[in-house]
Image: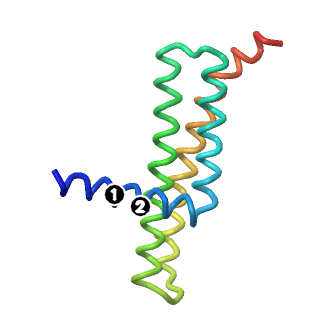
Amino acid sequence: MRRLIRSFGFAFKGLQYAASTQPNFRIHLGATVIAIGLGIALHLSTAEWQWVALSIALVLVTELINTAIETLTDLVSPTYNIKAGHVKDVSAGAVVVAAVFALITGCIVFIPKLILLV
């Protein structure tokens, strides 16, 4: 049981590291708060919450993986290396794909509800 608790401690330490060192992760956390607030205010259905939650998780997970890949790449290749640059670019590209998916999902879920308010 102690080992399990320790592993959660390491996980939260990783989240804290990402939140304190990665501006894009903080932006995504801010977008998460906004999406959840809008979802509560607009009374999303269960299905809509599932899509919003999936989008949030996908973006945060890819941003965390991107941070891990960039940190590891910097460790193994401290000087400029074109292939290391490709690794970091592809990793960042994965975050962009996830963020675009989240944006499209947000538009599909939130825009019709916001239009009804106007």
Dot 1: within a 10 Å radius of its alpha carbon, few (fewer than 14), some, or many (20 or more) residues?
A: few
State yes or no: discs 1 and 2 in contact (Cβ < 8 Å): yes
Give how far apart the Cα atoms at labels 1 and 2 are. 6 Å
In this rendered view, identify the residue nearer to me: 18 or 58. 18
Q: Which mark is residue 113?
A: none
Q: Residue at x 66, y 19 (%)?
A: 41
Q: If the image is split into quadrants, where does the C terminus sit?
A: top right
Report x, y in % for residue 24.
Answer: 62, 57
Q: Residue 13's mark?
A: 2
* Residue under the image location 65 percent in, 51 percent down: 27
Q: Amino acid at mark 1?
A: Gly
Location of residue 56 with respect to 10 vertically, above or below = above
Which residue is identified by label 1? 9
Asked which secondary structure carries label 1, the reply is helix
Residue at x 55%, y 58% (from the top left corner): 19
Q: Is residue 55 above or below residue 117?
A: below
- Give the residue type at disc 2: Lys
Q: Residue 2: x and y, percent?
A: 18, 55
Can you say whether 14 is above or below 57 in the image? below
Q: Quadrant of residue 106?
A: top right
Residue 77: x, y in percent? 44, 85
Residue at horizontal 53 percent and vertical 29 percent from the top: 52
Observer-nearest residue: 8 or 32? 8
Q: Residue furthest left?
A: 1
